[in-house]
Structures are given as C-alpha cells and as structure tokens.
Amino acid sequence: MKTPLLQIKDLSAAVGEKLILRGLCLTINAGETHVLMGQNGTGKSTLASAIMGSPAFDIISGEILFEGEDITGEPPDKRARRGIFLSFQNPEEVPGVTLENFLRTAKGAVTGEKPRLMQFKKDLRAEMERLGVAESYAGRELNVGFSGGEKKKAEILQLLTLAPKLAILDEPDSGLDVDAVKTVSEGIRRFRNEGNSLLIITHNAKLVRELKIDRVHVLENKRIGAEGGAELIDRIASGGFASVAGGLPRGDGR
Amino acid sequence: MSGTDSRGARRPGSAPDGIEDALRELYDKKGAMKPRFQVDSGLTPEIISAISDEKGDPQWMREFRQESLAIYGETPPPDWGPPLEGLDMDRIVTYVRPDARMEARWEDVPDEIKDTFERLGIPEAERTGLAGVGAQYDSEVVYHSVKREVSELGVVYTDMDTALRGEYGGMVRRHFMKLLTPREHKFMALHGAVWSGGSFVYVPDGVEVAIPLQSYFRFNAAGAGQFEHTLIIVGKGASLHFIEGCSAPKYNVANLHAGCVELFVGEGARLRYSTIENWSKNMYNLNSKRAAVEKNGIIEWVSGSFGSHTGCLYPMSVLRGEGARMDYTGITFAGAGQTLDTGAQVIHAAKNTSSRISAKSISKGGGKSTFRGGITVNREASGCRVSVSCDSLMLDSRSRSDTVPVLDVRCDDVDIGYEAKIGRISEQAIYYLMSRGISEDDAKAMIVNGFAEPISKELPLEYAVEMNNLISLEMKGNT
C-alpha cells in the first residue's frame, strides 16, 4: 500500500508578475525516488523552492500537502522540521558561521534535541571522510570560499546529517568532475532507504543510473508535460526533450 | 585645519561637506536649551568642595576640581556628534551631590532589564549587584583574590580614591587628566569636577600580567560609577589586558555616564583594553578614552557597544614613540531608539607608527549607528601605515548606518587604506538557514553573530559567549 508523502495539487506560482508554474500536479509516495527533468528555464528550481517554502515566490493557487497535511503557507523552517530538505544549486555563503556549528544547530532544530558535541563531531568527521571532504572544512565558514564541487559535497553532507524524509536535490551534480559526480552519487545512495523519498532534478543520466527510479517527470509549459518510468531518462538523453513532449500521458489528467 | 583643536587632537565629527544644514539645526536646538544650563549652575563650588571633603582629597585635587568646575561653567556643550537634547542637565546636581546617594531598589529596575538577566541565566544573587542596585556581594571576594595574585608580581590594582591618597598619589598626580584635560570638552570638565571611583593599575617594567583584570569587580565593590576615572600605566616591556565594565546590563537611576579613561603604554609595552558596554537604554554614555603609546608600544582596543540611548565613544590613540602600534576592533549594535556614535581616532606622531581599525556596526528597528574614523598623520610621521575597514549591516529599511572618515594627513610617505561597506542582511541566507530547520529569529541571530565573529574571537571566552547571547536577545525583540 503506497502512502503519499508529498502531494502537489494544481499549484500556480509566480515571481512578481511572471507566472512560472500553472496548475502543476505531482505526487511522491513514501519510499520512492523521482526524477524531475526539463529544459533550462522551465521552472524546475521554482518547483523545488515552492516545496521548500522560499519567500522569493508567490503561490497564486493550489496546495502542497506533506504526509496529508497542508503546508502551503508554512515557513521553510517548519517544513524542514517536518522532514523536507532541499539541496541548493548555489548554496549561500554565511560568513562567521562554521559548517560544524551550523550543522549541529540544524540537526538540533530538526530533531528537537541538540546532539551531544563529541558524538556529533565523530559522526560528522566520519561522514566527511566518506565524502572526501577534508576534516578542516568542519571549522570553515559555511560555503565561504568553497569551490563549486565543495559546495555540492557540503550539501550532500547536510543531507546525510539531517536525514530528512523527503530530499529534493536541485542539480546536485552540475559543474562537477567525473570523480565528484561519483562521490555525490554514492552519498545519495547512502541516504536513500525504504523510509525516505527523493526528488532529483538533473540533466545527467549518469547521476541516477545506479538508483532505482520510480518515476520521471518532465516540466514543460509551466506544468508536468510528460511522465514515465526510468526509460524516459534514456529517451531524453538520446532524442532530446522533443522526443517525449506531448506524446506521453499527461500528469494527473490535466 | 577645521576640526583640529589647539593640541592637534581632531574632534570627532568635524562637519563633512553637505551636512551643514543638519548641523545648523542641531546647533539651533542646542541654543534653545541654553537657559537650562544656567539653571544647573546649582553645581556650585560648595557642592564640589563637599565632594572633596567626603573623599578626603589632597589639596591639589581640591584645586583641580574647582578649576574644572570653572571650565565646565564657561564651556558650551559639544557642537558635534549626535543630539543630546534628551539629556537632563538639570539633574546633574542630583547625580553628583554627595549627600544625595543614588538609592535604587530592585523593584525599580525596569522589567526589560530583569528579563534580560533571566534570559542570560544570571543567578538571582548576582542580579541586584549587576543592576548597580546591590551593595557588595561575591565579586568583592573575587576582586580581592585577583588583587593578591597580581600584587605578588608588583602590580598595583586598586580603586582611584585609594590610589590618590596612598603611596602612588604622586604617580596619579603626574598622570591624572593629562591626556584628557578638562578643556577637552564640556563633559570632561564636568568629569574633572565631580569624578569619583574607577580603577588605578600600575604594571612595573617588564611584568607580564597573564590574567585579564576586570574593572567589573571593582565597580560592584565600590558602587557603579557615573563619573569613574580609569588610569592605567604600563611600564617598559610590560603587558596587561584590562576589561572595562561588564557585559550584563546595568541599570542606573541617573542617565548620564561621563567616565574618563587614560592609558599610558610604555616603551615596548602592550596593553589590551576591552569593553563590552550594555548600559540600560535610557543612558547617555559619553565616555572619553585616550592612550599615549611610546616607542614600539602596542595599544589594542576591543570594543562592543550594545546599550545606551545615545553613545559617543571614540577612543583616541596617540602614537608618540617610533614604531608604536594601535589596533582597534569594535562592534556596535543599535536597536530601536538607539543612536550609537562610535569610532576610533589615532594620531600618528612619530615615524613608522601603524594603526589598524576594524569596525563593524549593526542597526535594527530604526536604530542609528555612525562610525567615525579620525586619522591624523603628523608631518614627522614618515613610514607610517594606516588601515581602516568599516562594515555595516542593516537589518531593515528603517535603520540607519553611516561611516564618516576624517583624514588629516600632513606627510607624503604614508601608506593608507580605507574601505567601508554597508549592506543589508541577505534574505537568501535567512531562507537557506531556515530550510535547515532553523527558525527565522535564530537564522538572523546566526547571521549577525557570524558578522560579529571577527570581534567576538578577540574577546575572552565568557565575554564572547555573552556577546553572542546579547546579539541573540537583541534579535529576538519584536522591533
């Protein structure tokens, strides 16, 4: 029996006057891995931000349910405490706040109990080693002076530390070299278990090759234009977005 | 040069171009309050004499007070800096009259301050003391043990009243109000007339004091001062870290604080002077501080200003020996209703002297913060280096932040760097932290604490922790 974890119903969102999503519908069940694809500028990041609750976008209509509860008007911190996580494409730099302090505070915020210092340090160091992040980064200012690859790895480190129920990964592989893509991909696999779900935004078939994909969605004309199984990824890789546009069942009867 | 007084000391806030109208307005308002100043001529030679009697002043101090009173009477209020209209000068007599002891009761302390104690987790027993309403408590014991420890090194650490009358009376006389004279400005004249309390520290040549001395102990033991005088003399090659005031809020019945700090840093000596100021928000804090630094000596200022209604704090360093150095690290947090005018001044009076100023300011809820960097390089100060950086963070559009550089350079062979940045708190950064479960208030506090981090890392741990707590408390306010 599949339980819906995230349900997006008829969502329209805008930045100022500009409508970016119109009547979008999407459901992710508990324990599933979904991939969101689409041409540049179709609103993939907007959708991710809308799920996270970014104040930069206005929700015009529709609703977002998480575990059956309406979270449409909730601030991002509440959503995070419910178990939603977004790995940012370009994470912010926060001077004067160390990665370790930030992560420990965040972990305390999402679990409701600040982790014990020594155990937390130990766990963090172990995870950093697995991700190939130098130990010294724990004491560095959050994302300040990090290279593109280091920022992406730091996002995955946050994912693994906070262990959310739903992780939305917005192009976790963009700009990474082959080895780094491999490390990030392994990190994502380590995160994934039967109890959590993933929504991965990517252009890269390689990133998701070793994951079991339950559903692929293609954003087009401000809504989900095409949906299908994992085979869609390869079709897009060889034939481009045109090869799937319009010719496949529409999302949720729109 | 405009704005330079007879001793070459630059007054903070000498009118930069373009704000003359604003200054004129200020001036007119001050003119209108003149009659009230005449009323306060209630501050009479007899009252000053009574202060001398009560303190058992030596003859020279009796005369010094009377001369200062005369100067006070003839000096107009300062025509620079933030407006001081709200300052109730009529009450000066009440502040200083020795028989009118400022009786304060714990019940009279504003709830806002009681709350802060609560949230800072300060034990019940200490609160009355910290609020300046208690008499003596445990810190007296701490003070005495610190005193014993340093006196074994030959260090003299005592209150000014004792120093004045004791075996170091001659040393006090040679240094007292020599750096900041009663002619400096009206409030220094007032200070010279009515000062009481404060600390005297003498570190003999070559002695390195490992533990920071904190005037906080002294204040509580002697009763919090409104006009306290701090005199520190650090001998050749000696070193000291002195921490002024206390990070917990003090509530004072009177609303004017005009202390005076004079620091003498000997050849090759090093003095760090740290201040975390969190006076109650009805306070006009007009503290004056000055250091004279000899050859290869180092003065380091670490300053955090959080409290007060209006603050004017511009510590000045006079680098008068070759190779002398000055380092200023300061942060100001101006919340609703606060005008905090801070800065650092330095006079390069000898060759190869160097100064570094790093100032940060935060304004919120309509608070105003102004930073004034006053740099004077004398003709003879070749090879000197100056570096100033100011960084301001505004948390909303109602708040205000200004930086006012005043540079007076009379020498060609100088290396000067001056940079100022003013910015808003990043909405994207707040969102990013919130997306990790951190509440909006905590996210903002985290960003602001991060901004303040270069300052807090300069502080002893317990002060750094308390500064972070203060920032978090300020951030949680609704305004």
Image (cartoon, rainbow, N blue to C red):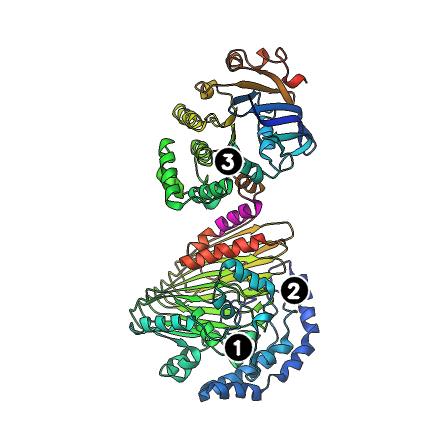
Disc 2/disc 1 C-alpha distance (Å): 26 Å
Q: Residue furthest front?
A: A1
Q: Is residue B387 visible?
A: no
**A169 shown above or below B38:** above
Which label is found at residue B191? 1
Task: Find the magenta span and give its range.
Answer: B439-452
Say which quarter of the image contains residue B84.
bottom right
Q: Is residue B441 magenta?
A: yes
Q: Secondary structure at mark 1?
A: helix
Q: Chain of mark 3?
A: A
> 10 Å neighbourhood of mark 3: few (<14), some, or many (≥20)?
some
Q: Main secondary structure of the magenta part?
A: helix
- Are the residues flagged by discs 2 and 1 from a single subunit? yes
The residue closer to the viewer here, B424 or B314, is B424
Sequence-wise, the earlier of marks 2 and 1 is: 2
x and y percentages locating residue B23 in the rendered image: 65, 64
x and y percentages locating residue B300 in the rendered image: 41, 62
Using residue B414 as the reference point, say whether residue B95 is left or right of it.
Answer: right
Looking at the picture, which amino acid does disc 3 mark? Pro
Disc 1/disc 3 C-alpha distance (Å): 53 Å
Which residue sits at x=56%, y=61%? B115
Q: Is residue B472 magenta?
A: no
CB-based contact (under 8 Å), mark 1 and mark 3: no
Looking at the picture, which amino acid does disc 1 mark? His
Which label is found at residue A91? 3
The residue closer to the viewer here, B462 or A4, is A4
> Residue at label 2?
B23
